Amino acid sequence: MCGGIITKNQEVKSMVLILFLFLQISPAGRFFTTLQDSATKQGIFISPGIERDTTTWFFVYYGGKFRMPNNFLIDIRVLFKHGNDSTYPFYNWHEIGEMDYTRALLCYQTKSFTLSWGLDSPTLSGGYFTKLFFDGFEPEFPQVQFSYRKKSLSFFYLIGQMEEVKSNPYKPTGDTKYFAYHEIKFNWRNLDFKFGEGVLFKNFNSSQPDWYLFTPLSIWYPRQANNGRADINIGWLFGLKFSATPTLTLYGELFVDDAPYKREADENPRIGGIIGFDRNGRTWRFITEGAFVTRYTYSYYPDRLELSWFYNSYPLGPITGTDFIKISSFVMKRGEIGAFGYIETLLQGEGRMGEPFCVGNLSRKVLLSGSVKKVFRLEAGLSSKIRSVNMLIRTGLLAGDERDFLAGINLNFGLFQ
């Protein structure tokens, strides 16, 4: 999503800013990515780095935001990777690497209105270390975004087309699917509430998709209740945030995948949740967050698995998968030489993303089922800034049922005008 607000008094010219401290698959790294991206205004950047996180890979991340006349803005991000790593863009050029856009948007912005068109991988969930619904690291897809804010009320809408990679390019399979999402947020004093509804659908029964599901102001769930689940998969996202003090925030989210609309539907619960607190002081920042996802979440009927929450084999939910409980704690000290520490405990059952959900089988355990894997992650690092160059060094380890050494170094360059 395009960020920042353009006013008539702002100069229309390029400035070089550093967008990210570092980019890698560790939860702490994703936190830094979110933190820096939310503060980005305009400019270009280049960010090389090398990471060791169960595998070793080298990356160069570059792009920029450019303000144009008449309230237009261009936002472009490109990622090049080399190494044995499974995150997007997937590595398949032996001894060379892989690269792709992670964002390419043309935006029109005013103080309360934003319209964007292009390629993007959106972030819809508000958790820091677990994203229940789109974590922003899936393959980008063509889409249109619209947002509007007026006082304490805001609205966001997205519609996009996801074209799956065909196993046989000479035999069309009609495997293009669509994703639509609308969200409303309301603020009352120190309390923020949001409700979002996402729908994944295909044109199974005709040559055209169901255009009702493209309408931003309609409620889509009754459409599924009336037509059945064969052609539509719907997820709900609820969020609540309470600012207890100027420096202390309590927050939580609940994701409901394809809620049953018949009382007699004896289904396993398919939900995920997050609860946490954020203590953000002038010098120190502390975050503790707990998350869980039940076994059959993000799944679908066996003969309609193409409507599971996947896109080109990448999950549209948490990268951890399903059937897990995770507790994360993070501490950061600001300063000319900053420091951070991160610790995570993960308990994961045998559930896997994409398996068909069960109906009428509530006796089967749906959280931490079967043999439970225990993984502990510990990370620590230092950061510093010299003029327009940011540097971050981290190290850590995995313990428990998975054991490995973690390390990384990342530089970020900018030349201010």
Image (cartoon, rainbow, N blue to C red):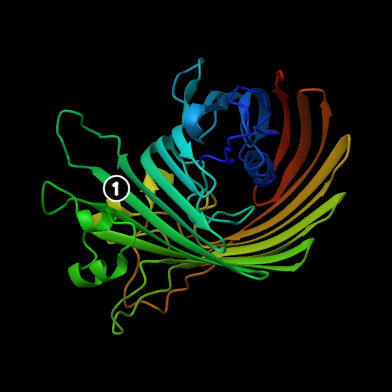
Give left or right: position of 105 versus 412.
left
Give left or right: position of 112 versus 307.
right
Count of labels in the image: 1
Location of residue 218 in the rendering, given as x and y in whole percent from the top left corner: 30, 64
Residue that mark 1 sits on: 178
Residue 28 location, quadrant:
top right
In the rendered image, the vertical position of residue 135 relative to residue 47, given as above or below? below
**Residue, x 28% and y 50% (percent of image)?**
306
Give left or right: position of 147 versus 59.
left
In the rendered image, the vertical position of residue 239 relative to residue 285, given as above or below? below
Location of residue 79 in the rendering, given as x and y in whole percent from the top left corner: 53, 26
Of all residues, the one furthest to the front in this rendering is 8
In the rendered image, the vertical position of residue 95 relative to residue 367, given as above or below? above
Of all residues, the one furthest to the top in this rendering is 96
Q: In which quarter of the image is the C terminus?
A: top right
Which amino acid, mark 1?
Tyr
**Residue, x 77% and y 35% (percent of image)?**
394
Relative depth, front residue between 301 and 249: 249
Of all residues, the one furthest to the bottom in this rendering is 264
Give left or right: position of 124 versus 127.
left
In the rendered image, the vertical position of residue 356 relative to residue 163, given as above or below? below
Location of residue 49 in the rendering, given as x and y in whole percent from the top left corner: 67, 25
Location of residue 208 in the rendering, given as x and y in whole percent from the top left corner: 14, 48
Residue 215 location, quadrant:
bottom left
Is residue 392 at least partly visible in the picture? yes
Relative depth, front residue between 60 and 346: 60
Is residue 89 at least partly visible in the picture? no
Q: How crowded is mark 1: few (under 14 residues within 10 Å), some or many (20 or more)?
A: many
Regarding mark 1 in the picture, which secondary structure is present there? strand
